[in-house]
Image: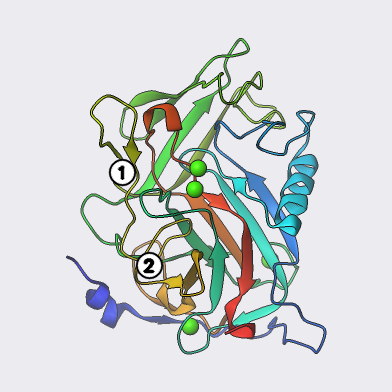
Amino acid sequence: MITSSCNKDGVITQPIEDHYRAKTSSSKADWSAVYDYTPAPGQFIGDSRTGGFSGKESTMADAVAYAEARLTKGTFISLGGFGGYMVVGFDHSIDNEVGYDIAIKGNAFDGSSEPGIVWVMQDEDGDGEPNDVWYELRGSESGKVETLQDYSVTYYRPKEEGQPVAWSDSEGNTGEIDYLGQYHSQPFYYPTWIKADSYTLSGTCLKARNYDKSGNGTMWIQPGYDWGYADNFSSKDCLEEDKKVNLFDISNAIDADGNSVELKYIDFVKIQTACNTKSGWLGEMSTEVCGVYDYTMRR
Ligand SMILES: [Ca+2]
Ligand SMILES: [Ca+2]
Ligand SMILES: [Ca+2]
Ligand SMILES: [Ca+2]
């Protein structure tokens, strides 16, 4: 296995401290706002039966309101296929203490991991918006040859209801997010609040591990990855008392070249579906998020 030790000499220190928001007695560990919810197409997107949508979401504000309502209840938000993401903020800056700092709850269990890559950001300009630099948090797959950085998928709106969503990627591949009408019968799996007829999502892509154990399509297994991902059944970073919670260390932040970045605190967290694959009747592999909190306040 390739480890990250080769980054030792590339450590970049961040002098920015100006906009640090210290905790107060009223600070809460939980996320305080959803800033963006842009899923890839998927079986839960727009689903009013099992996904909690009204089916009438027509703006980004509607989508964000949906995500905030779901997270408040602790029910899952699906990020759809590869590249789908959500961004949350907190009422204070999360300190990078020794060890784990951030906790993200998904809905993984043994054999059902749908890894999401976690990114962090400091509010460098202090405007309260996540418009600064995202740093990926290194996981067990970082630096491996099969892990694709700067990978992109473009999704195309179906022309008619009840159709799969076609995609093309930056590697020259094409495919479809399947339409699974017997389970999820909403007209479109393409987000209704995205006005463009196609949109592109970019990020780091992990090599898929899902396989059909039965050989006849009835039993799909989605194995876990070692560590460093949300919605991932891990023996390394799951919370002991709740295996659906993965823990993250801000010290694993890396820049676009894979160099370690030393962040003393962060203000925003992004979670993004990391695989572009599907598992038969289970549909596209899509990360789910049920909660995000400042682990330093609860450990
Ligand atoms: Ca830490
Ligand atoms: Ca900002
Ligand atoms: Ca999923
Ligand atoms: Ca899941």
- Above or below for 48 versus 180: below
Q: Quadrant of residue 66?
A: top right
Can residue 168 be spotted in the picture?
yes
Q: Name which residue lies at 66% across and 71% down.
A: 123
Q: Between residues 50 and 218, which one lies in front from this camera angle?
A: 218
Q: Mark 1 points at which residue?
A: 208
Q: Give residue 126's position: percent from left, percent from top.
A: 72, 73
The extreme top residue here reads 160
Circle number at residue 138: 2
- Above or below for 163 versus 273: above
Q: In which quarter of the image is residue 267?
A: bottom right
Q: How many marks?
A: 2
Look at the numbered disc 1 and say if its residue's Cβ is closer than 8 Å to ligand 3. Answer: no
Left or right side of 120 for 22: right
Kindly identify the amino acid type of the residue bearing the numbered disc 1.
Ala
Left or right side of 284 for 120: right
- Above or below for 273 versus 131: above
Kindly identify the amino acid type of the residue bearing the numbered disc 2.
Arg
Q: Give residue 155's position: percent from left, percent from top.
A: 51, 28
